[in-house]
């Protein structure tokens, strides 16, 4: 099949590359000239484990192409994916200017039947708006389909190649057949392609992310309660997670969820709800809990240092909003950095991937370390903000000998409490007795 993917951001590049991987001819379109040049020359523009290898292979096999020219990109295609940004506007609602702009352009270009697929996370009713924008100038037949993505950064290739499910919103039978054929290689293990109407598909995406955010904030509140009652959240997590109705995953407490999806999507669903006079009470609470959770460690740190952080130095392990990514959007570590520096402390940070991004954002507000151990030099305590695997079994003797005090504040419950006690650390984590 011949496919165009408009937008070569995170979703677009993964989508284009993975469709090429199953033998389709894919042209990715982007207005950013330098990005298109880089990608055409085999320079990948995002960090995503496993992506570069298949990107280079499909580029070499001539199945993956890049252009800035929309008309050239969509020529002779059957399907056009829209993978464009939908940044939150000031009021929290998703801004559709990029998507509707391209829809408008498509209306002027199209000459024959095409399936136009919304891959971006868009508010309910966007497919109708895209339909109308194209129909303004194109009087032929076409279908607008909602096909939300459920990729997790860090494992996006796997999520794309072996999805739990594919959600397709369309009322057009021709489009249904085309989408079924396109996704057949991805659901061979028997996972479903679930067809529904466009609006339900659009809402499914927000409902999925919001539900996962509910799970996380719920566990963060259980963790707070555990500390007050003397219970251990790890045990409670295991205790409830083995009930299949609850499920084991996404029950890990910590210093809050971040990234480009959960915060934005929860906020957007609250906003969409209010537009139809509905107050989504649970999600309001989820947002509040998450905001507080990002600074969950601060009272513990303040208590240890008698509310005097002036001149104290903190080693900070982890800056990305989660492991295996260099993404720092809404990363809890950034909130910690602000709180610590505002209190007069200095921060010596290490992250395997995200340091360049943080440096660009905060400049020399903090120091950056060469290695995780380098960050410990002269530090009064170690703080863990992201659970990279290399932080899980460190050389504890090295930590002990380099830190000024044997003090660890763990925002991701990476270590065993008993072991830390045996090693002589003052150790605080989330929802487990100190
Ligand atoms: C999320 C969803 O998981 C994807 O299904 C969805 O496609 C994507 O958003 C999107 O809308 O594009 P992602 O933002 O990459 O994916 O990250 P997750 O792995 O879901 O983690 C989100 C945040 O939740 C992270 O900050 C993580 O640390 C936190 N988290 C996750 C917890 O605090 N506890 C958990 O148990 C799980």
Image (tube, rainbow, N blue to C red):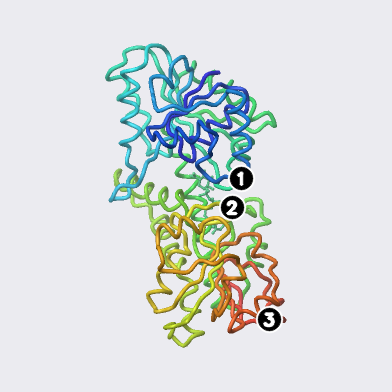
Task: Check residue 324 in the rendering and tell me which mark sits there, or answer none.
Answer: 2
CB within 8 Å, label 3 to label 2: no
Quarter placement of the C terminus: bottom right
Question: What is the secondary structure assignment of the residue under circle 3?
Answer: helix
The answer for how far apart the CA atoms under marks 3 and 2 are is 29 Å
Q: Quadrant of residue 361?
A: bottom left
Which mark's residue is nearer the viewer, 1 or 3?
1
User: Measured along the vertical axis of the image, is residue 409 above or below residue 71?
Assistant: below
SS state under label 1: loop
- Is residue 147 placed above or below 339 in the rendered structure? above
Circle 3: is it few (<14), some (14-19), or many (20+) Cα within 10 Å? few
In the structure shown, which secondary structural element does the residue marked by tag 2 occupy?
Answer: loop
Farthest residue, direction bottom: 306
Q: Nearer the viewer, residue 221 or 330?
A: 330
Q: Quadrant of residue 95?
A: top left
User: Quick one: 250 or 84, which is closer to the camera?
Assistant: 84
Q: Is residue 396 left or right of residue 208?
A: right
Mark 1 C-beta closer than 8 Å to ligand 1: no
Labelled disc at residue 421: 3
On the question of residue 61 being in view, the answer is yes
The residue depicted at 47 percent of the width and 39 percent of the height is 204
**Figure quadrant of the N terminus:** top right
């Amino acid at each position: 099949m011949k496919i165009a993917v408009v937008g070569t951001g995170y979703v677009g590049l993964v989508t284009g590359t993975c469709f090429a991987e199953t033998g389709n001819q894919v042209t990715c379109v982007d207005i950013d000239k330098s990005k298109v040049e880089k990608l055409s020359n085999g320079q990948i523009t995002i960090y995503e484990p496993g992506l570069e290898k298949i990107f280079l292979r499909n580029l070499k096999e001539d199945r993956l192409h890049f252009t800035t020219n929309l008309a050239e990109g969509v020529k002779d295609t059957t399907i056009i994916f829209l993978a464009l940004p939908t940044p939150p506007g000031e009021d929290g609602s998703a801004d559709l200017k990029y998507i509707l702009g391209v829809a408008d352009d498509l209306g002027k270009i199209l000459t024959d039947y095409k399936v136009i697929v919304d891959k971006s996370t868009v508010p309910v009713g966007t497919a109708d708006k895209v339909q109308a924008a194209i129909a303004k100038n194109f009087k032929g037949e076409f279908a607008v389909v909602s096909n939300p993505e459920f990729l997790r950064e860090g494992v996006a290739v796997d999520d794309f190649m072996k999805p739990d499910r594919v959600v397709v919103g369309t009322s057009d039978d021709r489009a249904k057949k085309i989408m079924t054929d396109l996704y057949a290689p991805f659901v061979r293990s028997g996972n479903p392609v679930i067809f529904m109407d466009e609006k339900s598909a659009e809402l499914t995406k927000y409902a999925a992310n919001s539900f996962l955010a509910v799970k996380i904030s719920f566990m963060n509140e259980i963790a707070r309660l555990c500390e007050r009652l003397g219970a251990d959240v790890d045990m409670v997590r295991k205790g409830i997670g083995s009930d299949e109705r609850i499920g084991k995953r996404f029950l890990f407490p910590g210093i809050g969820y971040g990234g480009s999806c959960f915060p934005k999507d929860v906020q957007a669903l609250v906003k969409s709800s209010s537009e139809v006079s509905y107050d989504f009470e649970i999600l309001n609470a989820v947002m509040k809990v998450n905001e507080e959770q990002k600074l969950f460690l601060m009272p513990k740190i303040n208590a240890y240092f008698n509310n005097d952080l002036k001149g104290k130095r903190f080693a900070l392990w982890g800056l990305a909003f989660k492991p295996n990514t260099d993404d720092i959007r809404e990363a809890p570590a950034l909130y910690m950095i602000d709180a610590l520096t505002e209190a007069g402390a200095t921060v010596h940070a290490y992250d395997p991937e995200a340091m360049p991004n943080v440096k660009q954002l905060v400049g020399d507000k903090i120091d950056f370390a060469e290695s995780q151990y380098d960050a410990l030099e002269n530090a009064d305590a170690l703080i863990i903000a992201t659970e990279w695997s290399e932080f899980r079994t460190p050389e504890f003797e090295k930590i002990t000998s380099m830190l000024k005090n044997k003090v660890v504040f763990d925002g991701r419950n990476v270590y065993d409490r008993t072991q830390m006690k045996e090693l002589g650390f003052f150790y605080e984590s989330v929802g487990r007795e100190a």
